[in-house]
Image (cartoon, rainbow, N blue to C red):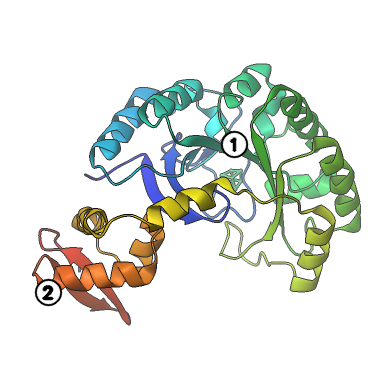
Amino acid sequence: MAYKYIFGPVMSSRLGRSLGLDLLGGRVCSMDCLYCEVGATRTLTLERKPYVPAEDILEELAAWKNEDLGAPDMVTLGGLGEPCLNSEMAKVIEGARQLFPETDIAVLTNSTLMTDPEVRAELAQADVVLPSLDSLVDSEFASVNRPCSSITPEQVAEGLLQFRKEFSGKIFLEILLVDGVNDSEENLDRLTVFCKRLGPDRVDVVTTNRPGTVRGTSPVNGALLSRWRARLEVGKYQTCASKAEVLAEMSPERLTALVEASLSRRPQTVSQLAGALNVDSEAVRETVEALQEQGDVISREDRGETFYHGTGHVMEE
Ligand code: SF4
């Protein structure tokens, strides 16, 4: 089945095998970040609406579950913009929990709506919240995140501190640095003080590594990144590793069924399959080759890589 609002699962260093849900259905966001990998924001807004009704998302999630591809480590709300803008976010969290009672629910957020007590209460229903905050210097915040005009970094920081008091789950803060834009010493000093007050479970300092919305946006150099990390980074999330071990120990029959199901949906290389299923790539290779020998899987070379697909799947030229 082709899904509109579900993507993945993908392997994430922070979340394990994460199944993503898109709550916006388009480029709707309260920011228009220089580095955004999904492109320029089309609707820059703070208005909460059911951009995608919870019912539609949960219908797809139920269909995905019925494919029996194994529960993900995490169901992650995010997508093509800011998920907190969807006024039915709480319903999505509740429905996802009913469908996957053993799986943690995460929300990726740019933190701008945390000033709203209602949004904080909804977010507090998740198990993990991954807020971002790239700068506490007004001019840098405006340059790197290009938010709706009424948003200030001080308000965002206050909203996050308030949320920390109300939320018993985990907070993984992300700070993304763009060369010459938000990598000043003043920002580092302010974020250091802020992180001490917030006490997040984990802090990740990253830089741009793919083309963003704005051409010419560059990553910071490795030495600067290391210095920021030494000052700010904390925490290591362990839960996913234990779940990965369980998956690694799955039976050959179960692995064969998962590989077949995945290849019937789309062509993939061995490493893509291994990443999606969170299984050792050698085990996947052996399984794929056995299926190919039986005639259940076909391969095709494309740009130097071998893609495999089920015999029922038609490869796009
Ligand atoms: S907040 Fe996220 S989705 Fe919105 S523009 Fe920035 S990077 Fe893109």
When asked about the image quadrant of residue 264, the answer is bottom left
Residue under the point 45% across and 36% down: 103
Identity, as a three-letter code, of the amino acid under mark 1: Val
Q: What x and y, as percent, mark residue 198?
A: 80, 36
Identity, as a three-letter code, of the amino acid under mark 2: Glu
Residue under the point 25% across and 63% down: 267
Does dot 1 land on a helix, a strand or a loop? strand
Does dot 2 land on a helix, a strand or a loop? helix
Q: What x and y, as percent, mark residue 242?
A: 51, 50
Query: Where does label 2 land, which residue?
Result: 293
Q: What x and y, as percent, mark residue 89?
A: 49, 25
| Earlier-in-chain disc, 2 versus 1 | 1
Q: Where in the image, quadrant-wise, is ligand 1 located? A: top right
- Name the foreground residue: 182 vs 225: 225
Mark 2 vs mark 1: in front: 2
Q: Residue 39: in sight, yes or no?
A: no
Furthest-top residue in view?
Answer: 118
Q: Is residue 147 left or right of residue 108?
A: right
Q: Is residue 254 above or below residue 29?
A: below
Image quadrant in which the C terminus is located: bottom left
When asked about the image quadrant of residue 96, the answer is top left
- Near mark 1 (Cα within 10 A), the count class, few <14, some 14-19 or many ≥20, is many
